[in-house]
Amino acid sequence: MNSVLGIILQRLGLGLLTLLVVSILIFASVNALPGDFAEAILGQGATPEAVAAIREDLGLNKHPVVRYFDWLGGVVTGDFGTSFAQANMASFAGADTGKGGIESVADQMAPRFKATLFLAGTAAVIAIPLSLTLGILAALYRNSAYDRFINVTTLSAISSPEFFLAYILILFLAYLNPILPSLSNYSVDLPFNEKLYYTLLPALTLTLAVTAQMMRMTRAAIINLLASPYIEMARLKGVSPLRVILVHALPNALAPIINVIALNLAYLITGVVVIEVVFVYPGIGQLFVDSVKNRDIPIVQACCLLFAAVYILLNLTADIMSILSNPRLRHPK
């Protein structure tokens, strides 16, 4: 038990260290981007005095190291700063540019992140059981017509970019057969059934994108174990093929399956940018794209850090669950 706790604490420490390094890379990369927010807002006719005034008001004239530690200190306390766009609009309107007069970055991101979580959760609820079932059946009927059909279908899905899958589904489910809306007028205030209605088409697109990888890993992991001596023994005892897979092979194949599921769950949250733009879904990916267009550095940094944190957290969870499900990983010697 102590060894397991030590491994978990070690993984958490490595995760925090990784997130710190990623935060440095994010801050350096975002601030190295060409262009200046003050000059972009004021346009070509901007005077140097006006540009300098806005830069001083937003803190852009400070040294990058000072700005990084100011930003990191705020992030640790849950304060991601103030959106440049909102601060600029408030100053034009004569409103208070302090944090009490306008929405903070965290306030803007919270409803968007909830929308993205709802989209990713809907896709995961469909994709995980579907991919496990298809993978188990493909292993059970290996080299059959069903296995070949599933393999061709999943390879086609993996080879197709997400926006192409999205437009195919829009064509068949929104245009030729108007079952679902092509644009997601999602809102956090809608009832659950309406949220699901506006989310289903982008969720189906994400399902097509991630099911193939999870299904193929499930099939490969189970088939790899079917040649093991203990599986042969179970067959010689007359155990049915389905029971051999579900009771004897699947539990020992969980470690790689959990890993690939966690990676795909991370993709559902961090890789939704294209899908949200195609369906105009009001999630964190759409906010990220809009902020990049507006050079709104605080929101861009916060979105990148959130994506990195989710990715690291899900990978850590997969790592820990793999260790717990496989005694050989707990005792490598």
Image (cartoon, rainbow, N blue to C red):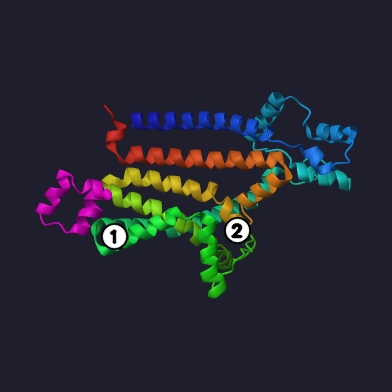
Which residue is rendered at x = 74% and y = 40% of the image? Answer: 82
Q: Nearer the viewer, residue 124 or 99?
A: 124
Residue 329 image position (x, y, % from top left):
31, 34
Query: Above or below — where is 218 with respect to 201?
Result: above
Which residue is rendered at x = 32% and y = 62% of the image? Answer: 149
Q: Nearer the viewer, residue 156 or 313?
A: 156
Q: Which residue is mark 2?
A: 278
Q: Which residue is mark 1?
A: 147
Q: 10 Å neighbourhood of mark 1: few (<14), some, or many (≥20)?
A: some
Which residue is rendered at x = 88% and y = 39% of the image? Answer: 46
What residue span does the magenta drawing correspond to?
222-249
Kind of residue sitting beneath label 2 = Val
Q: Looking at the figure, which quarter contains the N terminus?
A: top left
Q: Quadrant of residue 47?
A: top right
> Which secondary structure, mark 1?
helix
Q: Main secondary structure of the magenta part?
A: helix
Is residue 96 visible in this depiction of the protein?
Answer: no
Q: Looking at the figure, which quarter contains the C terminus?
A: top left
Q: Is residue 85 left or right of residue 111?
A: right
Residue 307 image position (x, y, % from top left):
56, 42
Query: Above or below — where is 159 with respect to 18?
Result: below
Q: Is residue 207 left or right of residue 49?
A: left
